[in-house]
Amino acid sequence: CSGGACSYAATTTTCPHGCAGAACTPPAGLVISELLYNSDGFPDTDSYLEIHGPPGLDLAGVAIVAVNGNGGGDYVTIALEGQLDSDGLFLVAHPEAADGIALVADLLDEGIDLQNGPDSVQLRYRGVVLDALAYGTFSGPAIAAGEGAPHPGADVGESLHRDETYADTGENAADFTAGAGTPGAPNAPAEAAPEVVLSCPTGDAVVGQVLAFDATPTRGDVATLAFTLGAGGASAGEAVGFRLERSFDAPGAYVVTATATSPSGATDAASCAVTVVAAPATELGGSELCGAAASGGYVEHHLAGAVEADGPVRVGVRYEAPASTPSSQRFVWELETAPGAWSSLGEGADAAAAGGFLTVTFEVPEATFNGALAAVGELVVRRAALAGAGGEDCDAVTLWLAPAETPASYRGAEQCFGSGAGAYLYDVMSNPVPATTDGVLMIRFKGTNPYGPGKYTFQLQTGQNTWVDVAQTREAIGTWREQRFIVSADLLNQAMATMGWIRFRHSAVYSGAGDNCTQLSLDYNCPSCLLCPPGEEDLGVGCVSTTAPYDYTLIDSNAGKCAQLYGTELTFEGVPTAGGDGSFSLQWLGCGSPSVAVTLWTLNSGWVDVGSASGGDCGYASATFTIPEAYLDAAVTAGHTLKVKARVTDHCAAGTGCASYSDPCIRKLRLTFPR
């Protein structure tokens, strides 16, 4: 320009891809095909970026531009020169890259050591964005300048790459995969993540049984397959192909996991559980007889069918004493080890202390057992006979081979408190074997109480004068109920270590009633015994159906509970999650136009009203209320309990009340709802 006048000279720009108006047309089909931004080291000398497009495409005017996630500004620009190779690829690498990268690179530039994210990189043609990739986790003010959702990023040494078709859907997170790179070479097909299915034995297995676990890959390539106990636990053993065969040395519940790993390190796992129980006892022989020998004589059991053992042998004795049994009678059992020679096996508990019934087990070493069998020709055990028993003195002996962890069982007799009963009834398991699993204590019980239903509390003797509560039943009524409790192996072993036996006791719910009766059994060293049958679950009161409606009644007695029941808190046990609205009913009485109000404890709102009713003037009235499912869901605790209050208000004049009642009274509080 001179003197305010300007002149213009025309220039010509060659547009290798055509023109649109006064601008060059951007090249079509050009994408970022692979990016490795974080190699091992500093600087990241093995970083590279690869682009893909039509083979032979001229890259004049194309540039790689790095965009800072902090603020969104450009921080590196690399102008490209040359053209795409016969595979449609062009690789830009760091000048100090390893030979496997540098020797196949089309352009070396230090600027390709991009930031590690969250950042972006774009492919531009004369300022027009052709493709863009955002990588890393963007949060707060970080700016993503890619396409669609950013890719979360790659681990050190991994590249982000498209699949073998170089598909571009406009979504970085979907279009790119992190994994092993292929710089300067066509992208490999995206590796399908492995998927594995594990087939396991069904039903319980026994100790020592060889079990087969078969893993079947259903998708992807599997480079390695490992079996572990639990997820990521210790090795379960060496697999042959995709099969693991192994046995277990002890009872228990085991989880076996098969983990498949692909060549790139992607994994999939499948698990299954197997329950291993003690091998069933191999019975060697048995005998049952009655003896009426004079005092000082013996009752001998001859077991001609016994066979040589290849392990320790347990001698099991089940004894039921007649009414004439002395209260402190104990029986010393002996084994004939040579003709006329006897060796003590041990002694049982007081027959009376065991309520007239006891089970005793004695363990005999293999050498002693086989030596006695060889010397005598048969197995003979004996114990002293009761004087004057008149043929009622009966017992039975069973011998069995003792595999590891033989299940230990005790079956108690039905016992009832008399009207003049003592403070406690006892059950004793003499000479028990050590516990390796928790025990299942099953209690049958019934009993009435004129002052309302009571509960039995069972205790285990753990010291000379020490008793520990191990079970409290639900309310006892006039008909039999049954409840299941778990007693820890530690507690059972403590009892055995200090007392030499397992001894339970309990008191009556009412000392003046003759129908306060119980019967218990104990099983341990039996992992399968701890499990509920299929279709049942243990909600704290024993195994119950998973589908049957919940239906339980508190104070299920005509006597009810009376006197000072102004809002007494009552607890339902074993309560499952409701599958619909529930129904709550009760009966009550008072004097002077009484009324009842029922409230329910909920975890989020405290006590909420269920309903109220009037009536029951010195005679039981009844009412039923609906409890919404939402209330029930909010009321059931993690321990599967639910609490209610029933407040009876009467209006008697001072000193008056209902004849024959210490009113107010409530009874038959029934809660029911669908599962």
Image: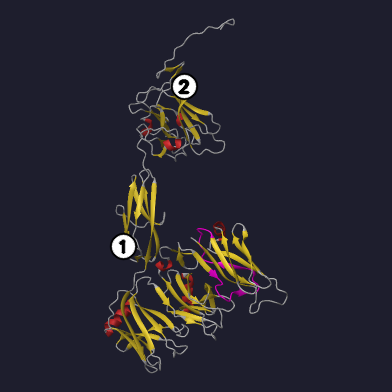
Indicate the position of residue 214 as horizontal and vertical percent values. 32, 55
Distance from label 2 to label 1 (Cα)?
71 Å
The reply to whether the C-beta atoms of the residues labelled 2 and 1 are less than 8 Å apart is: no
Q: Is residue 286 left or right of residue 35?
A: left
Give the image quarter of residue 221: top left
Q: Residue 654, can we see it? A: yes
Q: Residue 223, can we see it? A: no
Residue shown at 41% from the left, 75% from the top:
409
Indicate the position of residue 476 as horizontal and vertical percent values. 53, 75
The kind of secondary structure element at disc 2 is: loop
- Give the answer, above or below, for where 288 lies relative to 569: below
Label at residue 119: none
Q: Depth check: give the residue in front, 270 or 674.
A: 674
Q: Depth check: give the residue in front, 166 or 626.
A: 626
Q: Which residue is under mark 1?
A: 210
The kind of secondary structure element at disc 1 is: loop
Give the image quarter of residue 554: bottom right
Indicate the position of residue 101 as horizontal and vertical percent values. 38, 33
Q: Which residue is under mark 2?
A: 126
Q: Is residue 87 magenta?
A: no
